[in-house]
Image (tube, grey):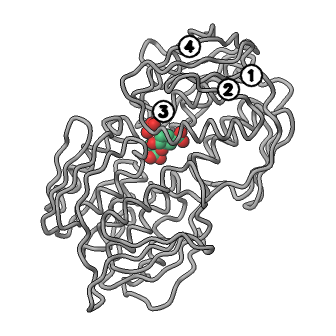
Amino acid sequence: MTDPSIWSAPHSPGPVDAVVAVPGSKSLTNRWLVLAALADGPCTLRRPLRSRDSERMVEALRCLGVVVDDGSEDAWTVTAPDRLHGDTEVDCGQAGTVMRFVPPIAALAHGAVRFDGHPTARTRPVGPVLEGLRALGVEVDDGGRGTLPYTVTGRGSVRGGHVPVDASASSQFVSALLLAGARFEEGLTLEHTGQTLPSTTHVEMTVQALRAVGVRVDQPHARTWRIEPGPVRAFDVAVEPDLSSAAPFVALAAVTGGTVTVPGWPAVTTQPGDRLREILELMGARTSLTEVGLVVRGPAGDDGRPARLAGVELDLSDVGELTPVVAALAALADGPSRLSGIGHLRGHETDRLAALVTEIGRLGGRAEETEDGLTVTPVPLHAARLRTYHDHRMAMFAAVVGAAVPGVQVEDVATADKTFPGFHEAWERAVGGDGAARGNAAAVQA
Ligand SMILES: O=C(O)C1=C[C@@H](OP(=O)(O)O)[C@@H](O)[C@H](O)C1
Ligand SMILES: C=C(OP(=O)(O)O)C(=O)O
């Protein structure tokens, strides 16, 4: 009998040719939801992401009294209550954005809000957000652990002011406090005190989202942000497609010497996935941003067979969530790669550096952890059964490798639902269902 939790990743013996529409951005959907919960009128999110992470955010806000009408796939409306209420429990699931962005909102509510989540989420760092709230006068009980579970007891208002935060383990500590800062009585001056700050693109995404809803944000120093107190203006926004969810699909073009088009790729964006254009070019693919979207062509020889990709040296600190897909490309390249600036990935959904080393090893490949990243030395890979560690991006890593290496099986591919519901079905359509390469473009609606 076949085990339904094991997925045979389709192998593509030739170039794929697909058009893949990916779902909305997790990071943008969850930021707009949080801002809508603080806004001065009803807000509309168009083409939002409906996935485990955004459902957890919707539920968290509902627990606080926010009314979210998510009945339609096209547009959700969000209406903040007159008073956010506490005396409730929030299930963060595995969503970093829920466990970090919602406590400052809970601090503005009336009553105790208890946070917990998936067992894997209980090891992820949140301490600096909780410490920051305490420094601003908020009552927080985390048993001194700095991880889930914890309780934030809101008194309806937060004093605000200056707060030092060491955000070297996650940029989300900065985003969390900035997102709520305009609703603090004295606003917020946040000073990052750590040596390094990962995912600065995501901090910029927060700053741009705040400015778009009328919040004044200044950055007096590279590592200091000032949020003036004031209203969050009601808004109506369209959510961009998630470019990190597009990552495995554009990688599919690269490893098969084929073509993948992602419609709706924004011309200007704060999403880290936009850096894929540069990364893919460095590895030997060709990319063009057209009116239709991003078109990626993988390198191919005169016989049409995929040509090998080049190894790369990359600092991925700003775009860490791309690492698993980039590591898959590196494992399939013809020269060594060094990926740096990503030590903080040890605190993601799983320890991604350890997971990638283990899974590349299972395929017969060679990868090693460095202090702040990975080295990958390509050797021919063989069939293997890969684990996904409850990590959506490890499922995406496995799918990319499986397109190039016959016989890859994947445990719990459904974990990709965290940000991409129906990922493996979309993947099968893109590769060609039965693994055969196709001549025609296939529209894949996620
Ligand atoms: O703010 C956000 O939406 C995110 C910030 C990043 O977190 P880290 O800075 O913890 O890597 C990123 O990896 C995560 O997927 C989403
Ligand atoms: C790190 C990630 O998620 P989270 O928002 O849970 O931190 C990710 O999506 O790669």
Is label 4 or label 2 in front?
A: 4
Regarding residue 94, the answer to whether it shows in the image is no
Instruction: Look at 72% across and 21% down and name the residue there.
Output: 228
Question: Left or right: where does residue 187 sit relative to residue 143?
Answer: right
Mark 3 vs ligand 1: CB below 8 Å:
yes
- Where is residue 408, by image quadrant? bottom left
Mark 1 / mark 3, whichever is N-terminal: 3
Q: Residue at x 65, y 30 (%)?
A: 179
Q: Amino acid at mark 3?
A: Ser
Q: Quadrant of residue 125?
A: top left
Q: Which residue is mark 4?
A: 163
Residue type at the position of mark 4: Val
Q: Position of residue 77 (x, y in %)?
A: 80, 48
Q: Say whether marks 1 and 2 touch (CB < 8 Å).
A: yes
Separation (CA) of disc 3 from disc 2: 15 Å
Residue highlighted by disc 1:
183
- Disc on the earlier residue, 3 or 2: 3
The image position of residue 214, as x and y in percent, is 78, 34
Residue position for label 3: 171
Q: Position of residue 120 (x, y in %)?
A: 40, 37
Q: Quadrant of the C terminus?
A: bottom right
Mark 4 / mark 2, whichever is N-terminal: 4
247 or 79: nearer the viewer = 247
Question: Where, quadrant-wise, is the N terminus in this rendering?
Answer: bottom left
Give me the residue at 76% from left, 31% from top: 38
Locate residue 309: give its quadrant. bottom left
Q: Which of the two discs, 4 and 3, labels the residue nearer the N terminus?
A: 4
Task: Mark 4 and ligand 1: say if the CB distance to the nearest ligand atom is below 8 Å.
Answer: no
Other-residue count near label 3 (Cα within 10 Å), few / some / many at <14 / 14–19 / ≥20: many
